[in-house]
C-alpha cells in the first residue's frame, strides 16, 4: 500500500515535470502546461503513467502559481512557476531571514527553493529534496536559468531525508506532507534535520476534525492532495509526538467541503525537555 501510493505520486509529478519543462515528448507537447496546478491537475493525471496521458488541465486558483505574489512570481523562471502545484506560499509562513539554511520537502520544480535562496541571501543556503528524477532535472535547470548559486537539489524521500542531523534552520513544504503515506516519519525527519531552535513553516491541505479518513477520500484523490490530508487535531498531535513545541495550524482558504489550505508552524526546542 505504501509503495503503491508513493508510485502514484511519483508518476503524477513526473508528468507534471515534463509539462512544466515544455518537453514535447512523444505526445507532441503538453497542452496547458502553465496551468498544471493542484488538485484539478492531479485528478486529470492520476492514471497518466505513460507519456500520452491527459493533457488538458484546468487552472485552479486554490493551488499553484496563483498563490504567489506578483513580485515572487516574477523573480523565478517561468518554468519553475508553471510547475508549482502547492496550496500556499511557505516562504511567507516561515518568515525567512538572511543567512538561514532552508530545506524544502518535496521541492518539485524548485520555485520555493529559488525564492528561499533569494531571501536568505548569499550567506544562506537553500536545499530541496524530491524523489522524482524528472522534477529534480527541472529544478536544477531552473536554478541554472535563475543563476542561483546557493541552492542544492538532492534525491530522496521526505520520510528519509538525505541531510545530516541539525543541519538546517528552517524546514518548509508546499502541499507535500499530505502526499506521504508515513507522515509520522516525515515529521520526525524534519525534527531531526533542524538545529535546536529551528522551525517548520508548512503550507498543506488540512481537514476539519469531524471528517473521517473515509470522508476525506470521498472529496478527492490521494495524489490530488485531498484523501491523504491530516485533520487539524492529527497534525498537532503528530508535531507534538515528533518533539515540536508552539505548534499551530491555521486554515487559510477552502479547497473542498471541510478541507482547507492551511499554514502549519512549529519549533524545535532550544534545549531537550523544553515545553
Image (cartoon, helix red, strand yellow):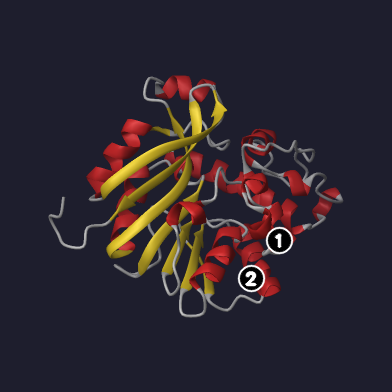
Q: Nearer the viewer, residue 228 or 145?
A: 145
Residue 74 shows which numbered tag?
A: 1
Q: Quadrant of residue 137?
A: bottom right
Residue positioned 43% across, 56% down in the render: 94
Q: Secondary structure at mark 1?
A: helix
- Relative placement, left or right, of 62 versus 257 is right
Residue positioned 78% across, 41% down in the render: 55
Q: Quadrant of the N terminus?
A: top left
Q: Quadrant of residue 17?
A: bottom right
Q: Secondary structure at mark 2?
A: helix
Nearer-N-terminus badge (2/1): 1
Q: Residues within 10 Å of mark 2 (few under 14, many from 20)?
A: many
Residue positioned 41% across, 26% down in the render: 208
Real-space Cα separation, disc 2 to disc 1, in angstroms: 14 Å
**Label 2, on which residue?**
143
Callout 2–callout 1 Cβ contact below 8 Å: no
Q: Residues within 10 Å of mark 1 (few under 14, many from 20)?
A: few
Vertical comparison of 263 with 152: above or below: above
Q: How many marks?
A: 2
Question: Which x, y percent locates residue 13?
Answer: 62, 48
Vertical comparison of 220 with 184: above or below: above
Q: Nearer the viewer, residue 257 or 69?
A: 69
- Relative placement, left or right, of 88 versus 210 is right
- Relative placement, left or right, of 260 versus 58 is left
Amino acid at each position: 500500500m505504501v509503495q503503491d501510493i508513493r508510485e502514484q505520486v511519483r508518476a503524477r509529478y513526473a508528468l507534471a515535470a515534463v509539462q512544466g519543462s515544455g518537453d514535447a515528448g512523444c505526445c507532441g507537447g503538453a497542452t496547458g502546461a502553465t496551468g498544471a496546478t493542484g488538485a484539478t491537475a492531479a485528478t486529470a493525471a492520476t492514471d497518466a503513467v505513460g507519456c500520452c496521458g491527459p493533457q488538458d488541465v484546468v487552472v485552479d486558483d486554490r493551488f499553484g502559481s496563483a498563490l504567489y505574489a506578483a513580485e515572487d512570481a516574477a523573480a523565478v523562471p517561468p518554468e519553475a512557476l508553471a510547475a508549482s502545484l502547492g496550496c500556499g506560499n511557505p516562504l511567507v509562513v516561515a518568515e525567512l531571514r538572511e543567512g538561514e539554511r532552508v530545506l524544502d520537502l518535496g521541492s518539485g520544480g524548485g520555485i520555493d527553493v529559488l525564492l528561499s535562496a533569494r531571501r536568505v541571501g548569499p550567506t544562506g543556503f537553500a536545499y530541496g529534496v524530491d524523489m522524482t528524477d524528472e522534477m529534480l532535472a527541472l529544478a536544477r535547470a531552473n536554478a541554472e536559468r535563475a543563476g542561483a548559486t546557493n541552492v542544492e537539489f538532492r534525491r530522496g524521500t521526505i520520510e528519509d531525508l538525505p541531510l545530516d542531523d541539525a543541519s538546517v534552520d528552517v524546514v518548509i513544504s508546499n502541499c507535500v506532507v499530505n502526499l506521504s503515506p508515513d507522515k509520522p516519519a516525515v515529521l520526525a525527519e524534519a525534527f531531526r534535520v533542524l538545529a535546536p531552535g529551528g522551525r517548520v513553516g508548512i503550507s498543506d491541505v488540512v481537514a476539519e476534525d469531524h471528517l473521517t479518513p473515509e470522508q476525506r477520500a470521498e472529496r478527492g484523490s490521494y495524489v490530488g492532495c485531498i484523501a491523504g490530508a491530516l485533520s487539524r487535531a492529527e497534525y498537532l498531535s503528530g508535531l507534538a509526538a515528533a518533539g515540536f513545541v508552539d505548534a499551530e495550524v491555521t486554515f487559510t482558504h477552502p479547497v473542498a467541503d471541510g478541507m482547507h489550505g492551511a499554514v502549519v508552524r512549529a519549533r524545535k526546542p532550544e534545549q531537550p525537555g523544553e515545553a
